[in-house]
Image (cartoon, helix red, strand yellow):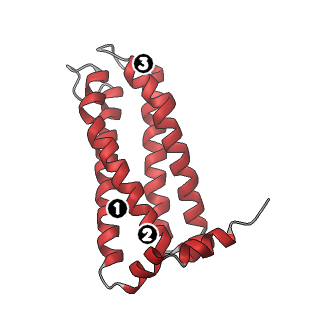
């Protein structure tokens, strides 16, 4: 398998990476938007998951709750991924040698695939019925994946 090291070196040397590293305020500002987006993403998904568990907004069909929160979820996801890319570029070589970075990327990949396949199918197929086993399972997996993304991301700063 070819090494990703040349790609990470290239990322680390891009104009954007150098500009972010040289700026006193760029990295903390980008990171603030990244964390706010992660919080908003987790909050919107948490509300949907709590509805899947039958603990919140019981009078609303699950599919309607998903439609209401979809713009928040997708908007936060766009900001999170965009700001995450900028943060990555500015620390690409650090990320290359960081186990938490690779773990975060693995969980992020799994969370995105799960959200846009299984989770979306379960949410859009539900109505007012009490939370079924598959709905509860989808909510549990969703919570676990997104919390893992956040925790692994936090570990990048410490390890």
Residue that badge 2 annotates: 87
Viewer-proximal residue, 90 or 118? Answer: 90
* Residue in the picture at 43% in, 50% down: 147
- Whichever of labels 1 and 3 marks the residue nearer the N terminus, that label is 1
Vertical comparison of 34 with 22: above or below: above
Name the secondary structure under disc 3: loop
Q: Is residue 4 among the parts visible in the rendering?
A: yes
Vertical comparison of 135 with 147: above or below: above
> Which numbered disc covers residue 88?
none
Residue that badge 3 annotates: 132
Asked if labels 3 and 1 touch by Cβ distance under 8 angstroms, the answer is: no
Q: Position of residue 14 (x, y in %)?
A: 51, 75
* Residue in the picture at 45% in, 59% down: 151
Q: Position of residue 48 (x, y in %)?
A: 32, 33
Q: CA distance from mark 1 to mark 3?
A: 34 Å
- Label 1 Cα crowd, 10 Å radius (few <14 / some 14-19 / many 20+): many
Vertical comparison of 28 with 143: above or below: below
Q: Is residue 157 among the parts visible in the rendering?
A: no
Asked if labels 1 and 2 touch by Cβ distance under 8 angstroms, the answer is: yes
- Whichever of labels 2 and 3 marks the residue nearer the N terminus, that label is 2
Asked if labels 3 and 2 touch by Cβ distance under 8 angstroms, the answer is: no
Name the secondary structure under disc 2: helix
Residue that badge 1 annotates: 34
């Amino acid at each position: 398998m070819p090494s990703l090291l040349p790609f990470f070196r290239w990322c680390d040397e891009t104009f954007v990476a150098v500009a972010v590293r040289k700026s006193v305020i760029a990295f903390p500002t980008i990171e603030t938007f990244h964390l706010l987006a992660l919080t908003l993403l987790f909050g919107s998904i948490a509300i949907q998951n709590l509805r899947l568990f039958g603990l919140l907004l019981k009078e609303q069909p699950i599919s309607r709750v998903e439609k209401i929160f979809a713009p928040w979820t997708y908007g936060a996801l766009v900001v999170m991924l965009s700001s995450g890319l900028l943060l990555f570029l500015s620390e690409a070589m650090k990320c290359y040698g960081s186990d938490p970075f690779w773990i975060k990327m693995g969980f992020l990949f799994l969370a995105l695939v799960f959200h846009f396949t299984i989770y979306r199918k379960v949410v859009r197929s539900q109505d007012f019925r009490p939370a079924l086993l598959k709905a509860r399972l989808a909510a549990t997996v969703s919570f676990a994946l997104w919390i893992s993304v956040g925790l692994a991301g936090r570990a990048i700063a410490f390890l």
